[in-house]
Structure formats: C-alpha cells, structure tokens
Image (spheres, rainbow, N blue to C red):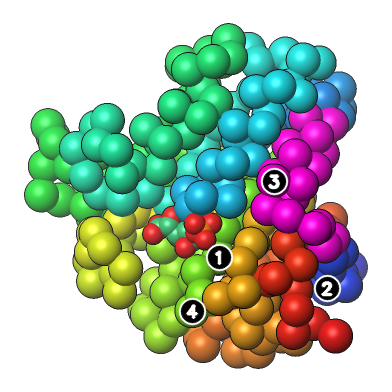
Amino acid sequence: MNSQHAQHSPEILVFDSSDALASAAAQRLAAAIVSAQSDRGVARIALTGGSTGIAALRALRTVGDPIDWGRVEIFWGDDRFLPAGHEDRNDAQADEALLSHVPVDAARVFRMPCDEGEFAGDATAGARAYEETLRSLTPDGKIPELDVHLLGMGPDGHINSLFPGKATLSERERAVVAEFDSPKPPPQRITLTFPVVNAARHVWFLVAGADKAPAVAKAVGRASPADYPAAGAQGRDGTTWFLDKNAAELLR
Ligand SMILES: O=C(O)[C@H](O)[C@@H](O)[C@H](O)[C@H](O)COP(=O)(O)O
C-alpha cells in the first residue's frame, strides 16, 4: 500500500462546547506525545494559530504532566510574516498559551522566520530557510514526519495559510512556501504545503463555531481542495475532526 495515498475515514468527535473540545484535544495530544516519545524518542508536533488551536494549547498546560517536554519538537503549520514577538504571530500566541509555561527545549522549538533581520521584506527567503531547517533534522535531508499536525480551519475552508484558489495548494515539491496575498490579514505568511501536512501520522482539525459548519460539511464530504483546502488534508495513520456542536451542525 502506498501510504501517501491511503484514505482513512476521518474520525469525527463532537463536543458540547469549544472548551470541552479544547480540553479533549489537549488530553489526546498529551497521550500522543507520550506515545510518540515511547516509540521514537521524540515527538514532533505542528501547531496551528486560531482561537480554537490556541485554546487547546492553553488546556495542555494543565494536562501535560506526563510529557517529557525536553523531547518534544515544536513546528508551525503556518505563521504570519511579521516581526518577532508580534501579538498576531502564531508562535507568540503559542508562547503565551503554553510554551512559556512548560520546560520545552528552546533549541527544539522551530519558529517560522519573522519579517526582520536577514529575512526583512523577503518571505520567500524565510520559507526557504524554514525548509532547510526542517531538512537539517533528518540524516537524509528529508522533511521530518510529524506525529500530529494540528489544524484550525477558517470559514472558507482554509488550513495553515493554504487558501481557496491559491497557487500554494498545488505545490508538490517545496515543503514550505510564502503567501503574499492572503485574503485574511496580514497578507504575507509562510506555510507548510500539502506534501508535509499529508505526510504527518495524524492530522487533527480543531474547529468551533456555526460559521464553520458549511466548510466542515464540504471538507468532510471531500469537496475539491481547490475550493475547500481542508478537504485535501489527511494524516497517514488517521484524521480526526474535533468539532463543537455548532461546527458539526450540517454533518447530519
Ligand atoms: O492564520 C490565520 O489567519 C489564522 O490562524 C487562521 O488560519 C485560523 O487558524 C483559522 O481561521 C481558524 O481560526 P479560529 O480557530 O479562531 O476559528
């Protein structure tokens, strides 16, 4: 079986509230990290921005007791190309929610480049540098396989900074690319591409709110990823949708 093309039915979990969703995702993430560390020594996790993903990180602070944080590698699915520490950066929000509260190894927190210093004004160079960083982590220069890739989803079905109708959706060679014209501000971003997302062992969508219900139904129903990018994301070993009941309301 070619695992790149394996199709699993997604697991769909529906919670009464976004808080319950965040708490359940955090508990499961703690277990997934422990399991990956037991199997491979290190757990590799890609974080997402967005209020639901950040709430899950905040919840992980309190359920993360069994985690050996020194053996967790943190990546981002995307980030806004802004100066370091900017409050709209996904990494700054993750710092505030989780990373500044747990004993992560700073050398194992792989932030996407910021719009400053050597990368100022050049998101393309930032994307290339992030890809080089990723490739430097494996002996053969391949992109490391993520254990869990967390994904928020916008009402338009976007994931990471992969937006409907954009050229980034058809990228098959590069692991990391820049987006210069995001429909959601800020316009410049850096994002992992589908080949990296779909090489992850597990892809978890964290989605809350009635405004997401149409896109959830389209993505779960396998609409075209060109129209609903979330429809194109699957984990090799499984895909899970963590939904609140509002986001799930058009599924049945
Ligand atoms: O880069 C961005 O503009 C956001 O991070 C965005 O991609 C977010 O993840 C989704 O829109 C879901 O956001 P919510 O969880 O807040 O609905």
Q: Quadrant of residue 92?
A: top left
In the image, which is nearer the foreground, mark 2 or mark 4? Answer: 4
List the single residue furthest toward the front: 16
Q: Please tell me the numbered disc located at residue 156.
A: 4
Residue type marked 4? Asp
The Cα–Cα distance between marks 4 and 3, rounded to whole angstroms, is 23 Å
Q: Please tell me which residue is depicted at 64% across the width and 61% down the height of the picture.
A: 207
Would you name the residue on which mark 3 appears? 19
Would you name the residue on which mark 1 appears? 153
Q: Position of residue 200 (x, y in %)?
A: 69, 51
State whether label 2 is within 8 Å of ligand 1: no
In the image, which is nearer the foreground, mark 1 or mark 3? Answer: 3
Q: Are marks 2 and 1 in contact (CB under 8 Å)?
A: no
State whether label 1 is within 8 Å of ligand 1: yes
Q: Quadrant of residue 174?
A: bottom left
In the image, which is nearer the foreground, mark 2 or mark 3? Answer: 3
Would you name the residue on which mark 2 appears? 7
Query: From this viewpoint, is residue 161 visible?
Result: yes
